[in-house]
Amino acid sequence: MKKVYSEFVLGDMRAYYVQDEETGSVELVLLPADRIYEVSYREKPYPDSLVQVKLAGDTYAGGYAGGRTMRQSASVQNLVFEGQDLEGCGVRGQEAVDGGAAFSARRVAGPCPAPESPKGGDAAVIRTTFSDKRGYRYRHYLIWKKGKKSLLSYTEFENASEEAADLEMLSSFSLGGISPYVGADEGGLIKLHRIRSVWSMEGRTESQLLEDLQLEPSWGGHAVRCERFGQVGSMPVNGYFPYAVVEDMKSDIFWGAMICHNASWQMELYRRGDEAALSGGLADYDFGHWMKTVAPGEIFVTPTAILSVCRGGGIEEISQRMTAALEEAVDKGPESEQELPVIFNEYCTTWGEPSHENICGILEAVKDKGFSYFVIDCGWYKQEGIPWDVAMGDYQVSKELFPDGLDKTVKAINDHGMKAGIWFEIDNVGEKAESYQDTAHLLTRNSRPLTTSMRRFWDMRQEWVQKYLEERVIGTLEKYGFAYMKMDYNDTIGVGCDGAESLGEGLRQNMEASLAFIRKVKERIPGIILENCSSGGHKLEPLMMGECSMASFSDAHECEEIPIIAAALHRVILPRQSQIWAVIREADSLKRIAYSIANTFLGRMCLSGDVTRLTDAQWDVIDRGIAFYKKAAPIIKDGYSRLYGPKVTSWRHPEGWQCLVRTQGGVEHEKKDGLLAVFHSFNGMHDGALEVPLPEDGTYRVEEVYSDAEADVIVADGRLVCRIPEDMRAVAVLAGKN
């Protein structure tokens, strides 16, 4: 039988630590603060441990679990609960239980170091400690900061024995008790929401009932039910985002989790009996070939997970509660970023052939247009006859394209009132670069250079590589005074590399070293703007987003689906970090230009294209769009998003319409008067009015409308009504309260 061991009220959330009286196992149940955990109906409790771990040599769980999941293994059954303690204040409930054991072991650095202990009374850290008889100790941390509507979770493993221990799985989080209000087993009540991501089509939400996932309990209570998913490789967002939301449709409760990790990760929705459990962290040995040897006296720390729970509001509410966890890191970023300045990137103008001459021509066309940054993209290093995408790695300035070096070009950018940025693909080496043959400093797998169709990869763990990149990357940034760096990453290592006890651990170490280099750039050049690009959106995970000012989410610059992708990504990244390109062509109609410009109102504005050949009429649409964006920037920066419109089935051939409504003031901020609505019509539109509800906290008036032509927009009966009689047209609206 289960009992509540401890209970903590964390803002509008309530954390229950529930113990099985027979086994001593402790699970974590999160609920909205106004809901009480009930245990009376649980006739067949299967306690789900707060810590999920698998050590090499320990027995897998039964129920056909082998190869399917490592959860609930003998390593978990060996855990002995030692106690729990609380650091910090501002938490209602049981403030300390038993006391935790002191420790002083050597910490093994992880890719996401544990958050700092709270200072003063602004946070609470709940530490739950377990051990087993072999001398291993486990500490799970649940962290809440005042005012936040999310939690941080991670686990430490300390080897206090005299022999090395081989970890094959260790969770960052595990939530049990899903769903607490179902009672006896019922069908069709629990749904898993995941967000898919492939190149140029990031952010599609996938929602499935537990029954569709074959997660119903068996008639006999036997057999493990588990849906394990994630991503393997150095592109952590190439298939799924590290994101999951579980919905209890009967009680309208949503549990959410995101993993902060720049390499292989996994999540598992697990069920044995009536209740389900959600856990995740590093991709384990079965899924990501990860095994970590922890020496005596060492501590291994998992990546951090972001958790939240709420009642009502749909997946928009739970998603924005989790993305809000990154606001603090972004707020601490460069001061120049706080007003969301506009960017010009020349890539879709020169297509990898930038030169001093053509950049100067572009500068004349865009001066005094409101751009703050001008980014020199790929190709500045290429040699004659060699394409940009196979030449990276050596990073010597091209004498053909920049005969006088980059000094004159950067000066020209500055003289035109903009700060200069530059492109690097730090980790990778193209097949035509001299560095491609430097195999002593490149990653290997099975003792052979790890090679894709055009690239190899630096072994970022090597001191030689770090110093080389300091010279070629940081040295270039410092020499020319670049204030902005676009960091690209155009292929993946896959399952892992040599140089560690497993391929997956090799990958983890390499990506940890890559992150360390990025932090070194920020230390050496305070205030630099970092753009996180990986063929578009392959690194849009919270750890990287916390280190960078923004990310360019897709390479689909000129495609009709851009607004669909941009709106969908509001569920996983902050719009203020979502760089959206408007690529303008000489042949573009005014309608097409306005459609592209309006896309950028869904995030951060970045322009490129045929800017030296545009007409005054075309520039007028652009100029009005830039002015509109700057007025909308406070709402983009600090707001709450709702998406309306029929489901768009095909993103490549979209039909119907959408409207993203963003009200000023986010889930953790005071509501303000500003409102931004961005309408897009797709194919199959006819003469008719598109209507979206306005917030109920006041009456609104239309203040400004952006489109290529006059637009019919009114407020009527608490709704914003916009008539768009044509396909593929955009209308954006700024509104305020009366």
Image (cartoon, rainbow, N blue to C red):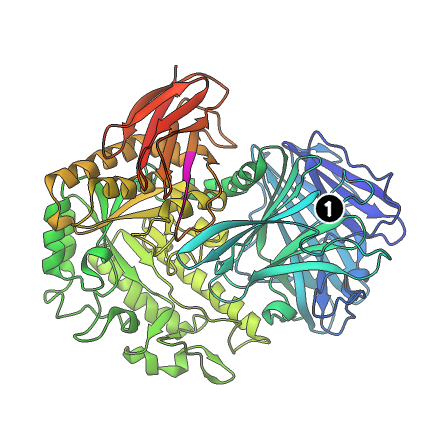
Image coordinates of residue 142 in percent, x first then y, are: 65, 45
Image coordinates of residue 373 in percent, x first then y, are: 24, 47
Residue in the picture at 49% in, 46% down: 572
Which quadrant would residue 602 be assigned to in this image?
Answer: top left
- 104 relative position to 382: left or right: right
Residue in the picture at 89% in, 46% down: 43
Nearest to the observer: residue 459 or residue 494: 494
Image coordinates of residue 579 in percent, x first then y, are: 35, 47
Mark 1: which amino acid? Answer: Leu
Mark 1 surroundings within 10 Å by alpha-carbon count, few (fewer than 14), some (14 through 19), many (20 or more): many
- 711 relative position to 14: left or right: left
Local secondary structure at mark 1: strand
Is 657 contained in the magenta span?
yes
Residue where numbered disc 1 is placed: 28
Which quadrant would residue 255 be assigned to in this image?
Answer: top right
- 513 relative position to 701: left or right: right
Nearest to the observer: residue 216 or residue 151: 216
In this rendering, the answer to whether 61 lies above or below 187 is: below
Image coordinates of residue 665 in percent, x first then y, are: 45, 29
Nearest to the observer: residue 70 or residue 725: 725
Can residue 615 be seen by looking at this rendering? yes
Quarter of the picture holding the C terminus: top left
Q: Which residues are magenta?
A: 654-660
